[in-house]
Image: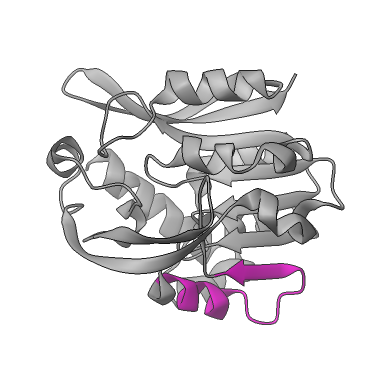
Amino acid sequence: MSSVRQLQAAKAWFSLTHPKAWRALARRVAPSIEHRDVIRSIRFDLLLDVGANRGQFSLMTRLEHPNVPIHAYEPLPGEGAVYREVFAGHPGIELHELALGESPGSAELHVSRRADSSSLLPIGDLQARLFPKTEEVGTHRVTVATLDSLEAHWKETSRALLKLDVQGFELSVLRGARRALRHCAYVYAECSEVPLYVGQALFPEVEAFLKGEGFKAISRANEQFAEGRLVQADHLFARA
């Protein structure tokens, strides 16, 4: 059995054995248990879930930290609709149908056959080769905001967790979040070591930017290797 199928089976079992995940499971959404160790190991008072997809990370966060409020950002309307169904009636959780970036406006989202691989950057040949069924199947115009312009979402906190899963657009989101970062204790970002999307910043650039903003990389999880090299991983940064 492949590691992907093992993870899928583990997610299904976790969902079946946790009644609070049943509503999501009925909508084919499972908590992202691959992030569970990170989520449960840190203390934060707000989740900013950027690239929320259908709510997998938000769900895992709420299972581990039931009272933490969440602002989630997902530009694809279909994925956002599922997110809202999963969390209907849950207080303190708000979804915003937006993409985040360095400057406000609108942009073409490059839609992947797998929605969670969609990006504001064109999907590269290497991404499509290493991760089958993630090729571009169309575009969708979306509204783009900066996190700094959404001050009402984070101004009352000093220990937020900023989670980024934006398929190569991490540095652009961070450049639009310099003031918001002062209210964050942690940044948890999926970063690439090789260019999977056209024009993306790689991990060293993201790390250098966050170092300049007072953060230090403290752990790495969910490493993905292909063709004998590290391709991407999830990195946890803490305010130094």
Does the magenta segment cover residue 92? yes
Res. 93 in view: yes
From the viewer's perspective, is 169 left or right of 102?
left
Q: Residue at x 41, y 67 (%)?
A: 142
Res. 19 in view: no
Residue 162 in the image: x percent, y percent?
Answer: 64, 43
Residue 163 in the image: x percent, y percent?
Answer: 58, 44
Towards the viewer: 205 or 8:
205
Q: Residue at x 26, y 30 (%)?
A: 195
In the displayed structure, 23 sits above or below 183; it is below
Q: Residue at x 85, y 41 (%)?
A: 158
Instruction: Tell me how many marks there are.
Output: 0
Towards the viewer: 12 or 79:
79
From the viewer's perspective, is 155 left or right of 202?
right
Range of the magenta residues? 79-96
Residue 136 in the image: x percent, y percent?
Answer: 18, 56
What color scheme is it?
A: one colour
Does the magenta segment cover residue 104? no
Q: Residue at x 42, y 60 (%)?
A: 12
Q: Which quarter shows the N terminus? A: top left
Q: Which quarter shows the C terminus? A: top right
Q: Quadrant of residue 167?
A: top left
From the viewer's perspective, is 188 left or right of 151?
left
Towards the viewer: 234 or 32:
234
Towards the viewer: 240 or 27:
240
Residue 125 in the image: x percent, y percent?
Answer: 13, 39
